[in-house]
Image (cartoon, grey):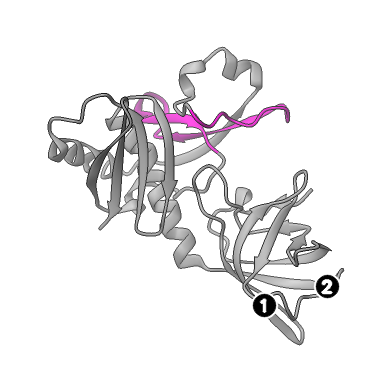
Amino acid sequence: MTELLFRKDAYAREAIGTVKAITTEGGIVLDGTLFYPTSGGQPGDSGALRWKGGEIEIATTVKGDGEDVVLIPAEPAGLPSLGQEVTQVLNWDRRLRHMRVHTALHLLSVVIPLPVSGGSIGTDKGRLDFDMPEAPEDKEALEADLNRLIACNLDVTEEWITDAELDAQPDLVKTMSVQPPRGSGQIRLIRIGVGAETADLQPCGGTHVANTEEIGRVRIGKIEKKGRQNRRVYLHLE
């Protein structure tokens, strides 16, 4: 099992790791990783691994067998050896933009309080698909509400509940297409706000900014019809 260092500190940019496996496709598995693997609509991290006498670019990161995380090199050559100690260097600017977009999408699901049927995160924009038979009447008002919420400087924190506790609060799950992973005994929740000032609370395994002020202003872009019931709403960083 790869230790998820990004879960302990989403702002860490460098860390030491040890190569514990090389996959048959040339992927690198470390004992602990800063690199977030593709999941939940959030792309896998990129960056580099450096060691004495070598360096390799990491193009993306994916989930492997069991609880392993696999770093995918840009070129399948010059790999580190098993047991090699390496320095992980995260492509921080890209990760931070993912964190800003991801957190903003949580708040988009607040100003549009409808079931979410899908989503995707990029460096400049993201989108959520809503169970929304009719398009919003006033997109500018939605955008203004969203930016007011962002400007409240709300803290973003994590907490954990059991499967049974989630079953008792099914309204916490906003996504229709992706259900929180079960079986480990605990499910991670992301809370935006504190106590009575909580704006959003839902299961999520991704990375987020620590305070909504880091998101900056956003713009709601196109709203596309996707099927009889669905509308796709795009959000852009400004």
Q: Is residue 98 above or below residue 182?
A: below
Mark 2 Cα-neighbour bin, 10 Å: few <14, some 14–19, many ≥20 = some
Q: Which residue is mark 1?
A: 56
Q: Quadrant of residue 135?
A: top left
User: At 75% across and 64% down in the image, what residue appears?
Assistant: 25
Q: Secondary structure at mark 2?
A: loop
State left or right for residue 151 relative to residue 172. Answer: left
**Amino acid at the residue labelled 1:** Ile
Q: Secondary structure at mark 1?
A: strand
**Amino acid at the residue labelled 2:** Gln
Range of residues picked out in magenta: 177-204
Query: Which of marks 2 and 1 precedes in the sequence?
Result: 1
Q: Quadrant of residue 223?
A: top left
Observer-nearest of 37 and 5: 37
Q: Which residue is mark 2?
A: 84
- Quadrant containing the C terminus in the rendered view: bottom left
